[in-house]
């Protein structure tokens, strides 16, 4: 074979030799793996990943017929297994270790164009071993030519494969030993993460070099540029702090003290798992940013990643971070764009898209918890590549208390892995810190020796305590009239009333409208996002001028900067009660403390004993148990640990992310007992697990509603959709998608679309659905300025 190609551009005719591609990827991977001591194993993977392209059939695809379907990723795995089998007696390692090494590296190479299940519901045998026999299953492949090419390449480049494999196994053992345990599931889960790490790095540099092969120069930050950026970021955050006036009160003095503590820790903390649990108003965002910027510089970290579960918090904090750092390399990522689960396409457009869309290669990333979880668990090309970007990073996990109990174990194990294997520093940031490191948990978080970034004594905490907490009606069950009576007792105060259900919110609001002169505002997910923000802005503008009442669901608990004199909160988890309390006397402007009353509601007012509210009901029961017999002022913050301890112990059976067939996502990513009946090591169903794990179970449909600017946008959208259906003018697609994007903030998510169908003025047909997606538009009459979606058609809404 005179000339063996890896890539050929069908437009320019430019070519890349396979030798060049393999060595480029291998060396890039080697350099990337040095700081986690995995350089040789990554070089080996990169060197062998595409040797299957030496097959004459693949060369025919490149040279003559680009549409030809040819497998190539299995060949590198087959070559490695065959070679190690041949030299096994020379290797100074136990057979079990060698076999596991072969399986993991073999899987990484064979899966670099598509993750697959080793065991799944369709097959009763080992799919990994089948990949190693690809040429025996399909006789059209010429493995001997591939083998000959590979041996010649090794000789030409003076690569001693025996030595390379020995060093690679040694590195693999060193990494594996960081997770030694007698627990088979623990070992297997971490084996899967080791595989994900290797595969992520392979995909990162395989795609990078492929794009460059097409004479497209991808933007890369050099070490010098990165160091200059780190210096710039540190100077920017220090300049921000230098602009603050000298503290004139106790709260500002403490904020300054906390920030100085973060500065010291940021300059000295080794990689680890830490906590930043500060009360509302203590300046967590700035403190975490200052800590992170000094970690980047002083501890030579590669990336600062800020993660929050709430879009409202993300947008607010992203603006603050951008205003301070002012740099083009800040990436804000919270779109839910479509990602192909498998892509074995080497075309120019495909590779550029795969690399440039959401690569997380920038030094500052601001993203959502949903995207973070996709990076940890999903199997698409983009998510896999992003996993490698977590290496040697500083990760701020804000409002971490919002994570559902179901993800506890897979979250804990992944965070432990990021620290131990990937040299990351992780900060759990919240005013209500979950006890993920509770010793009673089977798979606890392994926090660092000195986990608290900021030390606060009780006197300092009390300075930030702006509320007094009591039980409404002495803890006896209350109805809407008891709440009304409490509101009527204080006619000059602004009230926030937070309930668990939308029905309770509307019931209370309706009664109040007839019994008080104060303006009544409602907040719930029956309103579109733009409408909710407008209501919040109205409250901000009026609340300091006159007393008002806001009745809301729990959506007000995070990222909403409102300040009320009094709060009534129906029973829920202690964590949510503390978060709600942050909206009461938020800025400490009252002469006395704000008053919080906790309401144990009657079922006639608020029925949480339904399946859809099971999580809230579970938390209510524990809160009720903790608050029982407490009559005087309640130190609600001191009850947080007690709440989580009981909640986690009571719900440990849910912590492995239950799915169907009595299995869990944890099992699929560990020993895989459901399918792997012989309990063989490394037999995970990675792809199946990826399809099952969703941080938010999004089984809702989005309704576009008429509100404000959406009137004009909807009219234009319907006009374009009708025109498109008539003539399929592809030029309209871009405009339609732009309109849908602009209408996103005018949507309401509903669970039972069937209840709304007769009230829709537009529903996409199958043709539109297949080309553009599902589009549902609610008629104008069924969206109310006071209540959002008309309650008459939402009987099932809770």
Image (cartoon, rainbow, N blue to C red):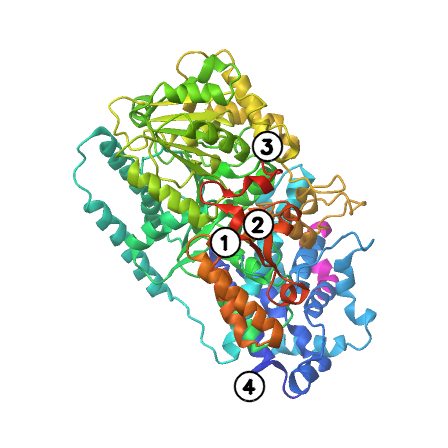
Q: Is 356 one of the magenta-colored residues? A: no
Do callouts 4 and 3 mark residues in contact (Cβ within 8 Å)? no
Mark 4 secondary-structure assignment = loop
Camera-nearest residue between 457 and 5: 457
Q: CA distance from mark 4 to mark 3?
A: 56 Å
Mark sitting on residue 615: 3
Residue 498 percent location from the top left of the image: 46, 30
Residues rendered magenta in the picture:
83-97
Mark sitting on residue 175: 2
Q: Closer to us: mark 3 or mark 1?
A: 3
Q: Residue at x 54, y 29 (%)?
A: 438
Earlier along the polypeptide chain: callout 4 or callout 2?
4
Q: Is residue 501 above or below residue 772?
A: above
Mark 1 secondary-structure assignment = helix
Residue 429 percent location from the top left of the image: 42, 39
Q: CA distance from mark 4 to mark 2?
A: 44 Å
Residue 47 shown left or right of residue 146 in the figure:
left
Q: Residue at x 39, y 50 (%)?
A: 315
Camera-nearest residue between 396 and 2: 396
Mark 3 secondary-structure assignment = helix
Q: Which residue is mark 4?
A: 11
Earlier along the polypeptide chain: callout 1 or callout 4?
4
Q: Which residue is mark 1?
A: 36
Q: Is residue 55 above or below residue 237?
A: below
Q: Residue at x 79, y 66 (%)?
A: 133
Q: Closer to us: mark 4 or mark 3?
A: 3
Q: Quadrant of the C terminus?
A: top right
């Amino acid at each position: 074979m005179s000339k063996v190609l890896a890539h050929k551009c069908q437009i320019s005719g430019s070519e890349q030799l396979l030798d060049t591609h393999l060595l480029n990827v291998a060396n890039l991977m080697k350099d990337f793996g040095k700081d986690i001591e995995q350089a040789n194993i990554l070089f080996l993977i990169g060197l062998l990943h595409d040797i299957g392209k030496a097959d004459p059939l693949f060369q025919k695809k490149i040279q003559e017929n680009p549409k030809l379907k040819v497998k190539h990723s299995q060949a590198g795995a087959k070559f490695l297994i065959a070679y190690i089998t041949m030299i096994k007696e020379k290797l100074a390692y136990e057979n079990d270790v060698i076999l596991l090494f072969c399986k993991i590296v073999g899987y990484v190479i064979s899966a670099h164009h598509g993750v697959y299940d080793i065991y799944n519901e369709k097959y009763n045998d080992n799919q990994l071993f089948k990949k190693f026999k690809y040429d025996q299953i399909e006789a059209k492949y010429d493995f001997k030519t591939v083998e000959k090419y590979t041996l010649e390449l090794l000789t030409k480049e003076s690569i001693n494969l025996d030595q390379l494999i020995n060093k690679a196994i040694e590195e693999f053992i060193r990494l594996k030993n960081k997770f030694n345990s007698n627990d088979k599931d623990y070992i297997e889960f971490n084996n899967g993460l080791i595989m994900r790490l290797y595969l992520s790095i392979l995909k990162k540099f395989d795609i990078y070099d492929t794009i460059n092969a097409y004479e497209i120069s991808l933007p890369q930050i050099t070490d010098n540029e990165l160091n200059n950026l780190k210096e710039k970021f540190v100077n920017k955050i220090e300049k921000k702090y230098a602009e603050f006036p000298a503290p004139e009160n106790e709260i500002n003095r403490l904020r300054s003290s906390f920030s100085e503590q973060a500065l010291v820790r940021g300059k000295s903390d080794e990689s680890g798992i830490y906590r930043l649990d500060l009360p509302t108003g203590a300046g967590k965002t700035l403190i975490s940013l200052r800590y992170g910027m000094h970690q980047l510089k002083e501890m030579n970290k590669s990336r600062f990643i800020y993660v929050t579960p709430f879009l409202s918090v993300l947008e607010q904090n992203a603006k603050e971070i951008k205003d301070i750092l002012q740099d083009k390399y800040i990436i804000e990522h919270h779109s839910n764009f479509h990602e192909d689960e498998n892509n074995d396409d080497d075309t120019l457009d495909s590779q550029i898209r795969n690399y440039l869309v959401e690569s997380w290669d920038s030094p500052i990333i601001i993203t959502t918890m949903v995207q973070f979880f996709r990076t940890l668990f999903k199997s698409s090309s983009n998510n896999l590549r992003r996993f490698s970007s977590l290496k040697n990073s500083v990760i701020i996990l804000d409002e971490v208390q919002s994570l559902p109990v179901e993800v506890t174990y897979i979250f804990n194990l992944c965070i432990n892995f990021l620290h131990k294997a990937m040299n990351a520093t992780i900060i759990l940031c919240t005013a209500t810190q979950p006890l993920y490191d509770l010793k009673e948990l089977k798979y606890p978080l392994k926090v660092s020796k000195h986990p608290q970034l900021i030390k606060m004594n009780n006197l300092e905490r009390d300075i930030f305590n702006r509320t007094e907490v009591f039980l409404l009606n002495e803890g006896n069950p209350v109805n809407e009239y008891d709440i009304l009576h409490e509101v009527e007792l204080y006619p000059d105060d602004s009230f926030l009333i937070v309930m668990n259900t939308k029905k309770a919110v509307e019931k209370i609001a309706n009664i109040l409208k007839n019994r008080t002169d104060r303006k009544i505002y409602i907040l719930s997910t029956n309103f579109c996002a733009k409408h909710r923000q407008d209501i919040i802005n109205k409250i901000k503008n009026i609340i300091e001028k006159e007393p008002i009442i806001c009745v809301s669901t729990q959506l007000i608990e995070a990222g909403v900067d409102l300040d009320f004199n009094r709060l009534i909160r129906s029973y829920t988890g202690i964590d949510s009660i503390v978060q709600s309390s942050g909206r009461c006397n938020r800025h400490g402007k009252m002469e006395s403390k704000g008053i919080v009353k906790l309401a144990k509601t009657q079922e006639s007012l608020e029925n949480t004993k339904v399946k859809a509210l099971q999580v809230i009901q579970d938390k209510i029961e524990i809160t009720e148990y903790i608050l029982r017999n407490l009559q005087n002022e309640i130190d609600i913050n001191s009850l947080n640990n007690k709440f989580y301890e009981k909640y986690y112990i009571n719900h440990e059976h849910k912590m492995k992310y239950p799915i169907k067939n009595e299995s869990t996502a944890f099992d699929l990513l560990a020993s895989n007992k459901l399918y792997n009946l012989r309990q063989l090591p490394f037999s995970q169903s990675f792809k199946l697990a990826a399809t099952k794990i969703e941080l938010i179970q999004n089984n809702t449909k989005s309704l576009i509603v008429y509100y404000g600017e959406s009137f004009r946008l909807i009219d234009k959208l319907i006009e374009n959709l009708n025109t498109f259906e008539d003539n399929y003018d592809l030029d309209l697609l871009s405009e339609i998608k732009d309109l849908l994007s602009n209408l996103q903030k005018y949507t309401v998510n509903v669970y039972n679309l069937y209840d709304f169908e007769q009230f829709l003025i537009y529903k996409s047909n199958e043709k539109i659905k297949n080309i553009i997606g599902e589009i549902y538009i609610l008629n104008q009459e069924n969206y109310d300025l006071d209540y959002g979606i008309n309650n008459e058609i939402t009987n099932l809404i809770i």
